Image (cartoon, coloured by chain):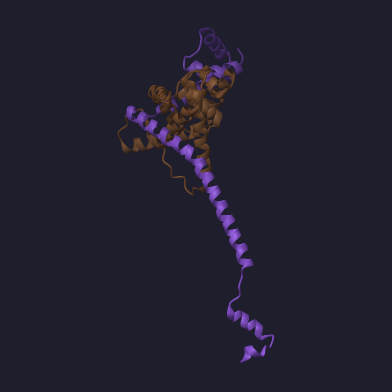
Amino acid sequence: MKVKVQNNFEEIIIKHQQKIYKFIFSFVKNENDTDEIAQQTFFNAFKGYKKFRGESSVDTWLIKIAINNIRTHFRKKKFFSIFKVLDNEEIEIKDLKDDSKSAEEVVKNKMISNKINKAIEDLPARQKEVFVMKHIDGLSISEIADILEIAEGSVKASIFKAINNLRKLLGGIDEL
Amino acid sequence: MNCDDVKNDLYFYIKNDIDLPTKKGIEEHIEKCSVCKELLNEFSKTLRVVDKCYVKVPSKNWDYFAEKTMDKIHVKRIYSFLRPTIGFMACVLIFAFSYRYYQLQKLQTITYVPSTEETVSYLVDFDIPELNE
């Protein structure tokens, strides 16, 4: 029985790991942290697998667990940032789609890219979650509403507020 | 449609992820409302900028990753059983050592035997002739 559960769960990991990994990475943007959160997510899912009643899809269930772990990660990060004198953390693997060759262009693009990521980071938690889920992960409104346990109207309103805030935060950036 | 209805649907209008009647409603409203028209342009511009900031998801060997995740789950399961046990054992040990220390302290107070030199110097004060010889 135990072996059967493990085998079933291994199948779940193989089937859903890429989506969950991509979902976590779209928030965290750091490979090591994503690895850790993804593994923690599957561990939590494994612990609660027997209690999973199939009311929502496995995808939604895993994303719900992942979003809780992401929140914990950011809470920890915020707490430990008090002890940091300099915030020298690098945001990883950010690239703009265009193939600019000159060093000047690369630096400029990197700066813009950092500013955009910082603007998304600085959004209020709910707006950030909804915006990333919709715009980057491409989840549907009903899926987001189900995951965050809020009304679909609230999801739409949060998306509007998020873009409005991004517009203000990115006001200085000209269109690339 | 009023401005509030249009605002909440602007993102979906830009992304063309909207049903036809709502799309038409938004277009009709934008024709008349300069505020919403300006907002639509600003939103389109913001989303174009955000879209160009592409974050590459690191490529992985997914079979290896799944295997590693299963291994981590096993380790964490063992650790999750061990943690309360270790905590309980630590509490028992601390209690046992504290109790033992307390008992020893008690015993030392009862069976305290002063050294000979201390006894002699104490008895000297009583002026016993045998001791002075």
Q: Residue furthest left?
A: A101
Counting the numbered discs, the total is 0
Residue B56 seen by the camera: no
Residue A109 is drawn in which quadrant? top left
Pinpoint residue A154: horizontal percent, then vertical percent.
59, 21
Between residues B36 and B126, which one lies in front from this camera angle?
B126
Pinpoint residue A34: horizontal percent, then vertical percent.
42, 33
Residue appearing at x 52%, y 44% in the figure: B87
Is B130 rendered above or below residue B36?
Answer: below
Residue appearing at x 63%, y 90% in the figure: B132
Residue A89 seen by the camera: yes
Residue A105 is drawn in which quadrant? top left
Residue appearing at x 49%, y 34% in the figure: A121
A53 displayed left or right of B108: left
Identify by letter the chain in purple. B
Identify by letter the chain in brown. A
Between residues A91 and B73, which one lies in front from this camera angle?
B73
Residue B78 is drawn in which quadrant? top left
Pinpoint residue B33: horizontal percent, then vertical percent.
58, 16
